[in-house]
Image (cartoon, grey):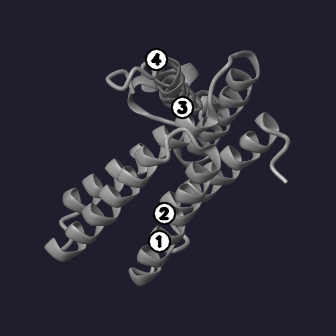
Amino acid sequence: MSIRKMKETANWYGNVVFIFIITWKLSVILFQFKMIVTNPLSILYFNGGMKGFWIGIAAGIVYTYFYMKHNEVRIEQFIQAWLLFIVIYEIVFAYVSQKSLIWLLIQLIIGILVIILSFLKEKQWIWQLQIMILYIGVLAVLYSLQNQLLSLPMAVYVIIVITLSLLAKIRRPNLD
């Protein structure tokens, strides 16, 4: 984001990642309070688990809402940042989990096509939304081929797509 002179988006993205990680890590205090009181250093070693993960996602969404409300930002840049993250995550995950070379190439080709489309239509927020929804749909098909349609990444993708779509609607009320 910084390389492409999208300073506001880079600032937002960095803050969202930081808020997510801190919330997820510190949520262990909520769920394991006795352990934290008896051994405060356990905060360094443990996180809030799945409950903390979802609280972190919610904190990132709330921050995004208020950030958009108080700053003059363009939703299409947020969508582009999210698309870039998903593409990189999917390619790295396919490589690290030692998927077949064909699977890795499929992920790479689809990801590169999505990024190219996103960059070609970078000033058109409705196109960004459509590209993001289409990419999540393609990922849903790919995940279903692996019997992982109801997995954590897909749940997060769908929630973020819905959130960004709603924020686009709030930001630009003339979507009809």
The residue that label 3 is drawn on is 20
Instruction: Give the image location of residue 5, x and y in percent.
Output: 40, 20
Which mark is first along the chain, 1 or 3? Answer: 3
Q: How many neighbours does mark 4 have within 10 angstroms: few (below 14), some (14-19), or many (20 or more)?
A: few
The residue that label 4 is drawn on is 7
Residue plotted at (24% across, 73% down): 103
| Mark 2 and mark 4: Cα distance apart in space | 25 Å
Residue plotted at (67% across, 26% down): 63
Circles 2, 1 touching at the beta carbon (< 8 Å): yes
Q: Is residue 25 above or below residue 143?
A: above
Which mark is first along the chain, 3 or 4? Answer: 4
The dot on residue 138 is 1
Q: Quadrant of residue 164?
A: top right
The residue that label 2 is drawn on is 135
Q: Secondary structure at mark 2?
A: helix
- Nearer the observer: mark 3 or 1; the answer is 1
| Mark 4 and mark 3: Cα distance apart in space | 20 Å
| Mark 2 and mark 3: Cα distance apart in space | 23 Å
151 displayed left or right of 65: left
Circles 4, 3 touching at the beta carbon (< 8 Å): no
Q: Secondary structure at mark 3?
A: helix
